[in-house]
Amino acid sequence: MYGLNPVRFNPTSQVTTTLGVNDGSIGDGAEDSTGKWLLVYNDNTASVPVGYGMVLNAGATGYSCTVSSATSADMLIGVVVNTSIVSAGYGWVLQRGFCNVQMGAASGTVLTKGTLQLGAAGLFFPKSNATGSKDNVVGCAMATIVTSASGPAFISVF
């Protein structure tokens, strides 16, 4: 039923390649004192590191996700927070709450309280205010984060 969170027996840091009877199903949501979480399947060919954003895989169904966004126009589904999610693995992504995000190599610096957008390959960038920018604001930096660094942010997917 929508709105009811099932009892979660595993922590949001758990990553597995096989879901057990107590693990839930992909697409299950959970909320706890650290934020709002979503259980996803990593449909990427590599592990997704902590601090990277994931998007729905256009060629898959359900909550199969990847970081292979070619542009920043993809919608963020969540951020990998506790443990890298291995390829063909299941793990929890944060949809709303505080976490560290990984900035892109040519992202530029985002200042404290500056807005963030998702960039290519699951990395984050300062939100562009250019005319016609289609990129969604997905979070707010809680401290200054420089190019290629990881830093604290508040993420809100929806």
Image: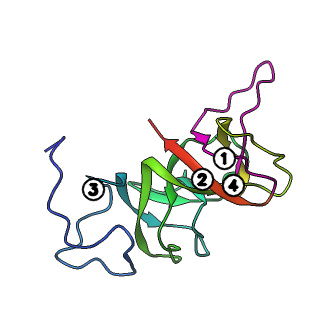
Residue nearest the observer in this picture, 47 or 60: 47
Q: Secondary structure at mark 3?
A: loop
Range shown magenta: 124-147
In the image, which is nearer the foreground, mark 3 or mark 1?
1
Q: Of the two numbered discs 2 and 3 on the same chain, state the one appearing first in sequence.
A: 3
Q: Are marks 3 and 1 in contact (CB under 8 Å)?
A: no
Q: CA distance from mark 2 to mark 3?
A: 26 Å
Foreground mark, 2 or 4, reads 2
Marks 4 & 1, CB-CB < 8 Å contact: no
Amino acid type at circle 3 is: Asp
Which residue lies under the disc numbered 1? Answer: 143
Measure how far apart labels 2 and 1 are at the Cα level. 6 Å
Rounded to the nearest angstrom, the CA distance separating label 4 from label 3 is 24 Å
Q: In the rendered image, which quarter is residue 44 located in?
A: bottom right
Residue appearing at x 60%, y 70% in the figure: 49
Q: Residues within 10 Å of mark 4 (few under 14, many from 20)?
A: many
Please report the residue visible at 17 percent of the width from the left and 74 percent of the height from the top. 22
Main SS class of the magenta portion in the image: loop
Q: Is residue 91 left or right of residue 125?
A: left
Which residue, as the protein is rendered here, is positioned at the far top?
A: 131
Numbered circle sitting on residue 152: 2
Query: Any mark on residue 123, and which?
Result: 4
- Give the residue pinned by disc 3: 28
Is the Cβ of the residue at disc 2 closer than 8 Å to that at disc 1? yes
Specify which label sits upstream in the sequence, 4 or 1. Answer: 4
Residue occupying image coordinates x 51% and y 77%: 86
Measured in 3D between alpha carbons, the distance from the residue under mark 3 to the one under mark 1, in whole angstroms, is: 31 Å
Q: Quadrant of residue 19?
A: bottom left
Q: Residues within 10 Å of mark 3 (few under 14, many from 20)?
A: some
